[in-house]
Amino acid sequence: MKPNEKLIDATADVLGRLLRFEYPADGVLSAYFREQRALQSRDRAFIAEHAYLVLRRLRWLRAIAGEHAGARKLLIAALARIQGLGVKQLAPLVSRKEAEWLETLAQSKADELSLGERTDLPDWVIERLSAQMDEAALLSLARALNQQAPLDLRINLMKTDREAVMATLANNGLTAEPGRYSPWALRLNERPSLSKNPLYEKGIIEVQDEGSQLLALLLAPRRGEMVVDFCAGAGGKTLAIGAMMRSTGRLYAFDVSEKRLIKMRPRVARSGLSNVHPVLIDSEADTKVKRLAGKIDRVLVDAPCSGLGTLRRNPDLKWRQTPQAVTELVAKQRAILAGASRLVKAGGRLVYATCSLLNEENRGVVDDFLASHPDFVRVPVNELLAAARIELDTGIDLELRPDLHGTDGFYAAVLERRAADGKQEQKNEE
């Protein structure tokens, strides 16, 4: 869609709000669109896409447009230097001063830019990632993080199969491909609105990144078991777990946010699951949690984290997060993992996961936990995936990256509580 003067004005307006970094970007955009109800869907798509483009490439854009360039100049620079619109195309849509300024923008050279400007990442994030990978890998990761995420679906196998959904989507003019790893995943080549799609309304499909779907596979719940999704949120992974259980047993969805649990209810209703029990808790030490100590077969801890693995979807996070916030999150992650572990019965399974790329939130938390909990052992994720006939090997833990795997950045470790006789649970799932 070609921009016009009105769209540039509107995008610059909302971008000015976003660049304050007071609230999550998706919430700011939603509030803006509620104010501007006259905007057409195509206009909304243009505004959201280009506002997010500036957020993704903010550090590079400031390097070429000036550190103190405002929202409007940053947008114009993005249209010219990233979208490839020439001065002649933009001149009728901007002021004469802006057109003259655009002609003065110097062509940036890679060797003149810092690593932070080339990757569009804050220095503190670069420092941590550089300790985990070499510069070539870091640049590859950053390029992927600065792209728009694809639209992944999870098929509700309690209601249909993947081939049937692909055929229905094709009849609606939508092309979908099977996921690389998850047996329930489809990836759409387009980004349509699905909220009114009959497949969505009937609970046949849910929007869920393929990497997130693998967490349920690692948890591997069985029919009739007692299972806890400890940080359930709005229930995306809860629904996947419940479907694996074929709506049998008992699935507790714990969360500290009543608002998130309320959002889960219509999703559960659409899914057809009857075994999901949302539970509001005040912390990992809640009495509702303590009552289940030693009684649960499987526990998933998708811990609150920096979210740096989701920058394709939430580019503002890299500018809103801080090293201090990560330190606080690590303390919270350790406390949640320790609290959740008390639920696991002997021989039961505990999966710790984040959507972070940072070792301190991932392997560091798990290593510290295992050092102080000798009754738990790590189960090699690559062996579990091989047994499930999933061709994916990231080593002993799951470590997904958008540039290597096409998913959001995810981490997961599988832990099992030693049975009374000291043996681990059989690894090959039924």
Image: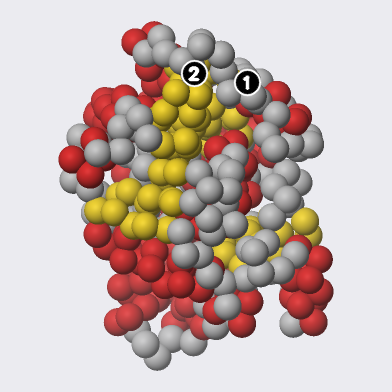
At x 46%, y 68%, the residue is 267
Label total for image: 2
Depth check: 394 or 346 in front?
346
Q: CA distance from mark 1 to mark 2?
A: 18 Å
- For marks 1 and 2, the one nearer the N-term is 1
- Residue at (49% x, 29% y) in the render: 348
Query: In the rendered structure, are the residues bearing label 1 and label 2 in contact, judged by CB atoms less than 8 Å apart?
Result: no
Q: Which residue is mark 1?
A: 380
Closer to us: 310 or 200: 200
For residue 396, side relative to residue 325 (left or right): right
**Residue 138 percent across, percent down from the top left:** 59, 27
Q: Quadrant of the N terminus?
A: bottom right
Regarding residue 425, the answer to whether it shows in the image is yes
Q: Outermost residue, bottom direction? A: 38
Residue 323 appears in which quarter of the rendering? Answer: top left
For badge 1, the amino acid type reads Pro
Examine the image and state in which quarter residue 148 appears: bottom right
**x and y percent of residue 329 in the render?**
29, 32
Q: Nearer the viewer, residue 315 or 179?
A: 179
Q: Of helix, strand and loop, which one carries label 1?
A: loop
Q: Determine whether, in the image, residue 169 is placed left or right of residue 333.
A: right
Q: Specify the farthest residue to the front.
A: 421
Name the residue rendered at 30%, 38% in the picture.
292
Q: Position of residue 273 (x, y in %)?
A: 51, 65
249 left or right of 170?
left
Front position among marks 1 and 2: 2
Task: Locate residue 89, reporting x and y percent.
Answer: 61, 73
Return the residue at label 2.
419
Q: Amino acid at mark 2?
A: Ala
- Kindly tell me whether residue 212 is visible in this rendering: no
Q: Residues within 10 Å of mark 1 (few under 14, many from 20)?
A: some
Q: Quadrant of the C terminus?
A: top right
